[in-house]
Image: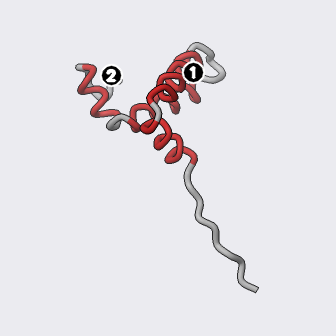
Amino acid sequence: MKKASTASVSHTEETIKELRADRQFAVAYLKAALEELDDPNNRAAGLLALRDVAEAYGGLGMVAEQAGISREAL
């Protein structure tokens, strides 16, 4: 008996889609990410969330360029 294959979608890809589609969600997600940065135990989660928001809006390079800073500084 063959097992039916199921397609999987990465959590990050789905999050980025939602961030692009719903600006209010993106703002709330960004606020939550910034709060996580204040907690040393959750800083990594905050950084990953910031990366998701940046990717949803053109990538880190684009966000850095629009902010007038280098990608590395971002």
Between 54 and 14, the one lying in front of the other is: 14
Query: Is residue 48 found left or right of 54 in the rendered image?
Result: right
Q: Residues within 10 Å of mark 2 (few under 14, many from 20)?
A: few
Q: Which mark is residue 32?
A: 1
- State the quadrant of the N terminus: bottom right
* 51 in relation to 67, above or below: below
Residue at 62% across, 17% down = 40
- Asked if 29 appears above or below 12 in the picture, the reply is above
Q: Residue furthest top?
A: 38
Marks 2,1: beta carbons within 8 A: no
Q: Position of residue 58 (x, y in %)?
A: 32, 37
Structural crowding at the residue carrying mark 1, measured as other residues with C-alpha within 10 Å and reported as few (<14), some (14–19) or many (≥20): some
User: Amino acid under label 2?
Assistant: Ala
Q: Position of residue 13 (x, y in %)?
A: 49, 47
Q: What's the amino acid at mark 1?
A: Ala
Q: Which residue is mark 2?
A: 73
